[in-house]
Amino acid sequence: MATPLASLDALVHPHQIEVQEFGSYALVIDARSAEAYQDDHIPGAVNVPVGPRDRPVREPVTDFTGVRDSEPGVPYVLAAHVRRLEAGGAVLVYCDRGGLDSQVWSEPLKAAGYYVDVLAGGWINYRRWVEAGLDVLPRALSFRVLVAPPVSGLSRIVARLTKRGEQVLDLTALAGQRLVPGLTLSVDTPPSQNAFETQLLQSLRRFDARRPVWIRISLCGFGDLVLPPSLRDVVARSVSVRLEVPLGARARAWNECLTSKGADADRLLEALSESSRPPRAETLDRWRSLYRSGQVVEALAEVITAYVEPCRVAEHWQRPPQVVTLPSLAPKALASVVDAWCGAAASSGADWTP
């Protein structure tokens, strides 16, 4: 059996697109339009779009710290970004026009003494690299899948695992689902599919392939986002744990979670009313009545059973999940269960079962 790689860089690294690790650059410039940048961008990049007037004209600016006297000088629109750079700092520039817009910014930066890389092949090459990485990396990792009915306290389990130093991939968090795990509401800020894939690749690249990765999966899906086929297939055949938690415990934990995020049941109900699939008006009125009479947990329990649970998607597991019943989501009880899992997992390796 092949020994797992400690680092996944041999499989997926920016060297494959002829640039350095993105975080090694003092500045990464995205020369595409604001709309394209908003959809997705290289991690850490700043958006400095090249407009029609930028292509033929470069206005020299030489009075900022870090920008040295040179001709044609650094264009004004770039000056605010390069003023913090040290002389000779490394900059990466990319665009989506075959390098034409990258050249508009790279040439004056080189003339000013900066070390500049231009992403060969531009944005489309970066996207090919992301897609290839998402095909390869999931197969190089060992996952332990955490699944549960919606709003079952998985965020608390993820927090405990993270505190213990375990490797965790929280897909619900990457999907931007804040108020209702598994459901994307108007108050959420979900990424585009491309941005989701960029974040996912960055997360996978950080893992040590010699250690398992705990992955949180929502049984309500991820809104309009879809998992890359390779990850979906690997997850389907991985060891998985299904949590079963009493409804009352789920509702209480959800209320605490909402409060910790600066929200409450009233804000949640407002978000549900504005969703693409709003509850009936009389149902919302009943939940608001319960909430305003102080029966917050009861209101949230009804939201779970009448609105959230019906959104569950079909499951496709090649290995039956191990069912674990948690009578409580209290921090001490939860910590004890998770710690026991980790201890058993460390001793049994790939044969681990909860």
Image: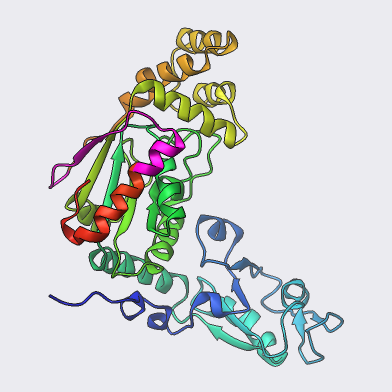
Instruction: Report the coloring of the rendering.
Output: rainbow
Q: Nearer the viewer, residue 239 or 8?
A: 239
Q: How many labels does the image show?
A: 0
Q: Where is residue 185 drawn, in percent x and y?
A: 49, 33
Inspect the magenta stretch and tell me whether residue 287 lies in it. no
Is residue 183 rendered to the left or right of residue 242? right
Does 128 appear above or below 111? above
- In the image, the segment drawn in magenta is 317-336
The residue located at (46%, 14%) in the rendering is 298
Above-or-below relation of 3 to 187 = below
The answer to if 326 sits in the magenta stretch is yes
Horizontal relation, residue 10 to residue 287: left or right? left
- Kindly identify the residue that appears in the image at 53 percent across and 21 percent down: 269
- For this view, does 183 lie left or right of residue 92? left
Residue 244 in the image: x percent, y percent?
28, 31
Q: Give the residue drawn at x 45%, y 59%.
A: 199
For this rendering, which residue is in front, 158 or 191? 158
